[in-house]
Amino acid sequence: MKTTLLRAATLPAVLLLVVYLAGCAPTPPLRSYEEPPMHTLAEFDDEKIAHVDDPWERFNRRMYTFNYTLDQYLFLPVVDAYEFVTPKFVQTGVSNFFKNIGEICTLYNSVLQLRGKKAATTTGRFLINSTIGLAGLFDPATSMGLKRQNEDFGQTLGHWGVDTGPYLVLPALGPATLRGAGGIAVDTSVHIPLIDEVDLDSQVELGMDTVKGVDKRHDQSFRYYQSGYPFEYSVVRFVTRKKTELAVIK
Amino acid sequence: MKHLTLWLTVLVLLLPTLGRAAGAGYGYPISGSYEATILGTPDELKPPLPKRIPLRDLVLEPLPDLKKPRVFFYDKGLYCTLAAQKKKAPLVFLVAGTGAGHRAARMVSLTRVLYQAGFHVIALSSPTHPNFIINASTSHVPGDLADDAADLYQVMHTAWEAVKDDIEVSDFRLAGYSLGGTQAAFVARLDEQRQLFNFSRVLMINPAVSLYDSVGRIEALLDNIPGGPRRIGAFFNRMLDRFVEFYQTGQFIELDDEFLYAIYRNRLVSQAEAGGLIGLTFRVNSAGMIFAADVMTGGGYIVPKNRVLATTDSLDDYFQVGVRLSFFQYFDEFFYPAMRARRPGLSREALIDSLSLRAIETSLRGNPKFAALINDDDFILSAADRDYLQDLFGERTRVYPRGGHLGNFEYTENMAAMVAFLGRIDATGGTER
């Protein structure tokens, strides 16, 4: 119980930290030993390309770098080992299992947004996959034509008119928005009592959390700085922001 | 089923052109040059490949004692991909196109196809890719074909030293696409002098003949957008709005190929706009190249001279500026002065002339180790360029009726032609593949 409380408290604590550490990061003015470049933004009269407001850029860039380091020394070695030792069908089964639990999150958020069709599809998926799909290890629902939907509390907030808020790179979890981060906090705090209901041994619970984390990183092909493109941070920020906006439209 | 319906629709849309194309007997379906370039090859028309191919990353340090600015802290060396056979086989070096890395989609496809055909493969990033500019370019200023070829040759040498104890190689071959194809010709010429690899086959896929002319043709695509090249920001935002609106009205969940083809089917993008998107993509790559080159040479072009960038500094302004600089500006304001500093008396015209296959014509003409695959509607070549390539290599220049620039690269027939040429037994009775 103590661990669950701790986990539930982590995200709000992180958000507070963000507000403390955040500072604006515009391009700094020229220092005495620097000379102005031949071309600056001032000479162009045009709209910005892929521009996203980023008032917490300094913090965000630090987190982006932190996540890269975390990936290099912790997550990716673990994911590599996991992919090496487990057969492909086991990996798929594990992914399906956790995605099936995730349907609950999509379900109540669909309900909260009064999206009947999505809620029905998701209920159908959850029932089929939990039974015929052997507790979610398989995904027969998709081949029956029930496509996986995707809703979370961040989208629910968006649906009811809450602004996306500033761009925010979360430690370990990665690029998000403030609204998305709040959504994750709520969805996590719903998820934890749900798991507690199953009344697992705390060792087993910890093991489940670990596998879930590994599966989550395994599922994402994104690698920090892999593109080698110097403006990767800006591109990722733009894509994250657009995806967040589009998810609410649908 | 979903794909079938999709393709039936596409085919119906293309009927008028298909009638014309049927005579040529070439099955790549997308007729417009810009459309083909943007859409590429539909999955159904790509060759089937085994999912698991052992691709290994190599990390090389071709320039010892290199000092890297802090802003590139994540850059641990030059990355390239190795696909190694367990038995003796020819080794193919691949060179990527402008701005592309060793793991670009086309590079991975060609690596896999060649691996499946029995070759060892080492895939290299383009000398215009930031990772190459930082780690492997002696001048850190990309664009000079002879210099870039020398750097590529050094990288190939370093890569070969790193793997030669692990793999058994019978002989060496070379291939590149787009600018990488042009560079491959320059590398092969250098190899004839240094004789380290003695490449038996050199394949150029959609190469440029003259770098200056070809990039000029890509730049010209921005002339036709509303407001011209100086309004690419407004152009980008307008296109984005239109796609978002379309997404909103359709039954899409993912932003994937299906969405892309739907944009095409619904004729959401005009000819001028499709060209503009290609030009814009080029500029986005070019911005990364200019930034890397500027920082590595001490700044002064888009980054203040002597500025030490921290990892937390915003780079947004440099991106916005980089995207707005044309290739001609880069050429006249950055590249040419850097070249002239090293070769006093070098005229602008002489520099432009040196950046062309015509400058090394004597080592290319009639040389049976070279071949080129080009498209009749590739906008980076002029009609004269196409004639020139046919004149240089005769039957070993194959001209496809469609495909734009690299659109048909992954089409089954094209990939088979790449493997066939690289695998042919060479004149001196060299090894089979």
Image (cartoon, helix red, strand yellow):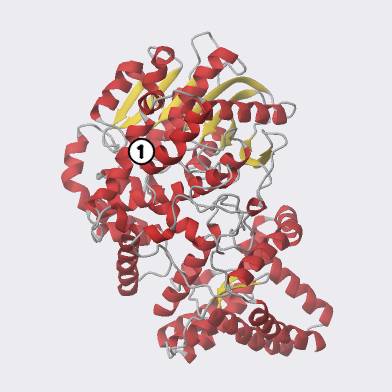
Quadrant of the image for the C terminus of chain A?
A: bottom left
Asked if residue B162 lies left or right of residue A99, the reply is right
Q: Name the residue under label 1.
A: B215
What residue is drawn where x is 48% and y is 24%? B344
Query: Where is residue B345, by image quadrant?
Result: top left
Which residue appears farthest toward the top when viewing the image?
Answer: B428
Answer above or below: position of B250 versus A232. below
Q: Nearest the camera: B327 or B241? A: B327
What residue is drawn where x is 54% and y is 9%? B429
Q: Mark 1 lies on which chain?
A: B
Asked if residue B316 lies left or right of residue A130, the reply is left
Q: Nearest the camera: B245 or B110? A: B245
Asked if residue B430 lies left or right of residue B4, the reply is right
Q: Nearest the camera: A197 or B179? A: B179
Q: Which amino acid does label 1 sit on?
A: Val
Q: Position of residue B55 (x, y in %)?
A: 63, 42
Query: Where is residue B159, by image quadrant?
Result: top right
Q: Position of residue A92 (x, y in %)?
A: 62, 62
Q: Tag 1: Cα neighbours inside 10 Å, few (<14), some, or many (≥20)?
A: some
What residue is drawn where x is 62% and y is 56%? B309
Residue B411 seen in the current view: yes
Q: Where is residue B343 in the image (x, y as percent from the top left)?
A: 50, 24
Q: Position of residue B303 (x, y in %)?
A: 53, 52
